[in-house]
Image (cartoon, grey):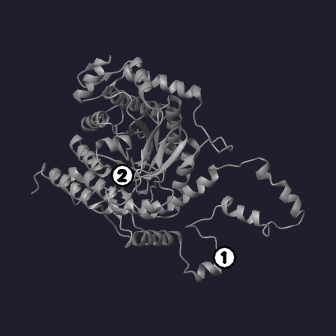
Amino acid sequence: MIVANQCAAQSPQFRVLSDQQCQQLFLAALECLSRVGMKIPNLEAQELLKKAGARVENQLVYLPPQLIQRAIADVPQMFNLWRRDGSQTIQIAPDRVYFGTGPTCSNYIEPLSGVRRKAQRGDAAMTAHVCDALPNLDYVMSLSLYSDVTPALSPVYEFVDMISNTVKPIAAWANDPATLEDIYRIASAVAGGEDNLKRRPFVLFFTTYESPLQLDTRQTANLIWAAQHGMPLVCLGGPTTGSESPAYSASALMLHLASALCTVAVVQLAKPGTAMMIGAVPSAMDLRTARPAYGSPEGVLHTAAASDLARYLGIPFMGTAGASESKLLDAQAGIEITLQIMASCLSGAGMVHDVGFLDCADIGSLEMVVMADEVIAMLKRFMRGVEVNQQTLMLDMVEKVGPGGSFLNQPKAAKLCRGEIWVPGLLDRNSYPIWEKSGSLDLQQRAKAKVANILENHQPAPLSTEVIKEIDEILIQAESRYNRD
């Protein structure tokens, strides 16, 4: 976890938007919802909104400002996610920043061979296994979309693989309420019952809205189901600036906020007080390819601005970082993820997902996850800032050592070095002869070796035999819903 804007020291920080700009964007989003409306085909959501004062015309729903304002007031500004063993929490609160991987990559880089292939059963297990060992990854997403299971059940199998290989919190997605219920039942079995899961949730439900100004029928149903069953949740979306919004940043942010606030209204009407987050991936369209560019400076800027908007409204936020347009772990990947991670830390971007993405979110890479873990570690030290007080000035020691002296032979000073000066675990600082003698490994080779070492030597806490049997039975029941040729 990284705590931005801490009180003990003046932590480095920045804002993209002033309060006045946030207010202007908020008012514009309210006007957009009441004047332009949202396309919401889901009939249950239409009925909830209509009863609350919205105007419904076919699939278009026009939401009055007071409806949105009431919904915002119902959102908890803080909630906890736990580890599955009941220890430690992620406290979702303003300016606390947590990092995790991303979901649904169609392709996956085999960690041992380095071959890019279709994602398959077991990839989410490797992702969770590696994240379980990395100190700066706070929660887990699957980094894969399985190609070798019943397609509709991919999120369920991904969740099983993750929950079996990490004790860290998990953000899970689902195709429809049936698969969400499968995941909920599995999580309840692991927790020892629904009551335990609700008291100490270790699963966050993750879904998206469509841009511009649309809520998918099944994902809206998932939002309502999750809220009614007490699951913390996040709804996240674009737009891709230039294609799903005008090219101006202000317009893109207004469209993001309008859609996000509509999801807040649906969720809080389904169950007031539901713990939830809004999120943004407002990347720019590359004019040459028409693809969204995760590594664009506009995407980084817009995500930080969206974090400002969420903070202004008192709603928890999910951001995006650790993703690159590169196809492998190279200098481009390093440049893009460092800018993203730094901006996320400085803006206090809440839960930050998509660590490990390559090629416009199409490739999952554990080497990328390991490299991002190192960047996050560096930023943790940076975000501690400079503490200035009598103890840290150490004038007595300066007087004792005197001009021209050395502090290395002072026991207290040497001990302080280990706590104050960050030491890398992956980056190389040796002299050229020592680096050469150690095998002349570049960063990609060192990252690959670290992944292999974790997979071979780290042992995640296992599930009990009884829970594994219960999960297997849930999977059998889930498969029975589909006819496989």
Q: Position of residue 478 (x, y in %)?
A: 17, 50
Q: Residues within 10 Å of mark 2 (few under 14, many from 20)?
A: many
> Would residue 200 be seen by someone viewing this image from the given angle?
yes
Distance CA(mark 1)–CA(mark 2): 39 Å
**What residue type is disc 2 on?**
Pro
Q: Which residue is mark 2?
A: 103
Q: Position of residue 345 (x, y in %)?
A: 56, 47
Q: Position of residue 166 (x, y in %)?
A: 38, 58
Of the numbered discs 1 and 2, the one sitting upstream in the chain is 2
| Point 64% across, 78% down: residue | 432
Disc 2, SS: loop
Q: Which residue appears farthest toward the right when viewing the image?
A: 403
**What residue type is disc 1 on?**
Ser
| Point 66% across, 76% down: residue | 431
Question: Residue 482 or 299: which is nearer the viewer?
Answer: 482
Q: Which residue is mark 1?
A: 431
In the picture, measured across the screen, residue 297 lies left or right of residue 53, that is right
| Figure disc tally | 2
Q: Which residue appears farthest toward the bottom when viewing the image?
A: 437
Question: Residue 50 or 77: which is nearer the viewer?
Answer: 77
